[in-house]
Amino acid sequence: MALVELSHVSKRFTKGDETIVPLDDVCLAIEAGEFVSLMGPSGTGKSTLLNLVAGIDRPDSGQIIVAGTEITDLSRSRMADWRAQNLGYIFQTHNLIPVLTAYENVELPTLLLKLKASERRQRVELALEAVGLADRADHYPRQLSGGQEQRIGIARAIVSHPKVVVADEPTGSLDGQTSEQIQTLLQRLNQELGITLLMVTHDREVAGIAKRQLSLDQGRFRETNVRMQPNEIASR
Amino acid sequence: MLAKYILKTLWGHRGRTALTISGSMVAMFVFCIVGSIQEGLDRLTRSADADRHLIVFQENRFCPTSSRLPEDYARQIREVPGVRDVMPIQVWTNNCRASLDIVVFNGADPEQIRRSRPLVLTAGSWESFQTKHDAAIIGSNIAKRRQLQVGDQFSIGDVSVHIAGVFKSDVAAEENLIYTALSFLQYTEGLESAGLVTQFEVRVSVESNPDEVASEIDRQLRVGPVATKTRRKGAFQASTLSDLVDLIGFAHWLGYACVGLVLSLVATTTVMSVQDRIQEYAVLQTVGVRPFGCTRLVLTESVLLCLAGGAAGSLIAMVILSIAGFAIGAEGATIAFSPSLALFLKSVGVSVAVGIAAGIAPAIQAASVPIAQALQKE
């Protein structure tokens, strides 16, 4: 069974008289340990799909199973519990809590898990080391550069050992050199720690770091090798 | 972590936090002052003392200077069934109208005062009071207000006394009084009250009905040279202070207005805070904080703002009330503005309740934020 399974998922929005269909009967399967990038121009439904997998949005129809849990019908509270245990989210603009230090930001998701204080501390320190910012633990977000903030955001996403990490344009707000550092870091997380990654980007070069590249346009996957039927999902 | 996050958030917006807390502080300070006036009136009119004691006053007279009863009435009153004790009192006040600095002298038999009044001397001695003709013991409130102490000479109008003691009392209004010997006030030059008293305070036996005893006293004294009107002490004081009672009733609304002010102030701050940080709540929920967790965060923040301001304002009010010895009076009766633990706890409780009420709507907003939409606003 795939780690992430989307089966006939549709999502539509209404803007005035216009109905927008970012996802139209989409099916997708992602195996554990995969690094998948999702490309496409703005407004093609990449982020919508990412949000559905992350459980922060709900489809109009279809079924989403992540890490063995069908998340489509979970209540908000149960969905939050599920996210705390199974999901890491890397935001485009870092979204660190400004009043907390880098350490406290990374520690935040672990406070929602039943961990001993010593284990929590160890996880936070390891996560900060993994992103190369152990020496910035006491810094506040305003004292960090954009790239450092994003690395703290990545540490926060992996600290609770989630089954899936989703990244929404993780390099979208960074300069070229910093973007490369983040790309390298994401590759390392996938290759060395075996973290399953689903990354949304509009940048073809960034998408290239993923082992599997998908493209969305007008609510559907365009590349034939990724537009799968439910029976194909079952076979993977 | 919850506490650390909230405290850091409040500190991070310390300008807004300080303004909100100071606003709550001022409002709850006023709430406590108004509450202390209300409490003072309640104590005066609803105490056991007010219920089991009667005041015999001249009929159709209100100000103590106009009530002049023969001292000899005490003998007749003592014979009325149900009467346990009678204390003739000569009252002198510097002002019959409502005043914040009223000075009231009660002249009575020193031995009877010592026996029947719940007074505890904190300075001076009873012996000195009982042996010196112009000696007086003064309530702690008036001592604070007029900065008087044992050994001082205190003069006002035609009355001049030597302070022999300062007392505290369970009955707060007592602490605004000055007690002298009855004969001293009766024979003070200018008062012309030899053989006369202003009123009689009558203690009724437990098994008797005070109202029936009061009617019987008035009936028996009707044949005397001066007709009397006898009422329970509480009713007498409420009647004496009737104008003030209306004002205090109106001031009660001021207390409610203070609560409303805190509510709107803290609600505005909390709503602004949540709207400013709506993305932050979306992020918190994305990392796994439950919606109820966000509700708790917002409610705790608004309660803390209210509680900090409310507790500080109440504490300041209590300190000022205990130091200043405020009292308002009219026609010889006084209402003491005293600090009380009950009032402080009530004020703190109201602050917490207002904090919860102010935080409910923004807490719901933070908990029900559409996460994906809020994150797109970056």
Image (cartoon, coloured by chain):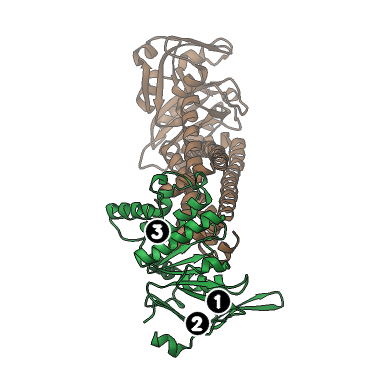
Q: Nearer the viewer, residue B75 or B16?
A: B16
Which residue does the numbered mark 3 point to in the structure image? A109
Q: Amino acid at mark 3?
A: Pro
CB atoms at circles 1 and 2 under 8 Å apart?
yes
Q: Nearer the viewer, residue A19 or A205?
A: A205
Which residue does the numbered mark 2 point to in the structure image? A226
N-terminal label among 1 and 3 = 3
Which chain letter matches label 3? A
Quarter occupied by the C terminus of chain A: bottom left
Q: Colour of chain A?
A: green
Q: Nearer the viewer, mark 1 or mark 3?
A: 1
User: In this rendering, do the residues under marks 3 and 2 share a single chain?
Assistant: yes
Q: Nearer the viewer, mark 3 or mark 2?
A: 2
N-terminal label among 3 and 2 = 3
Which residue does the numbered mark 1 point to in the structure image? A215
Q: Nearer the viewer, residue A218 or B18?
A: A218
Which chain letter matches label 1? A
Q: Colour of chain B?
A: brown
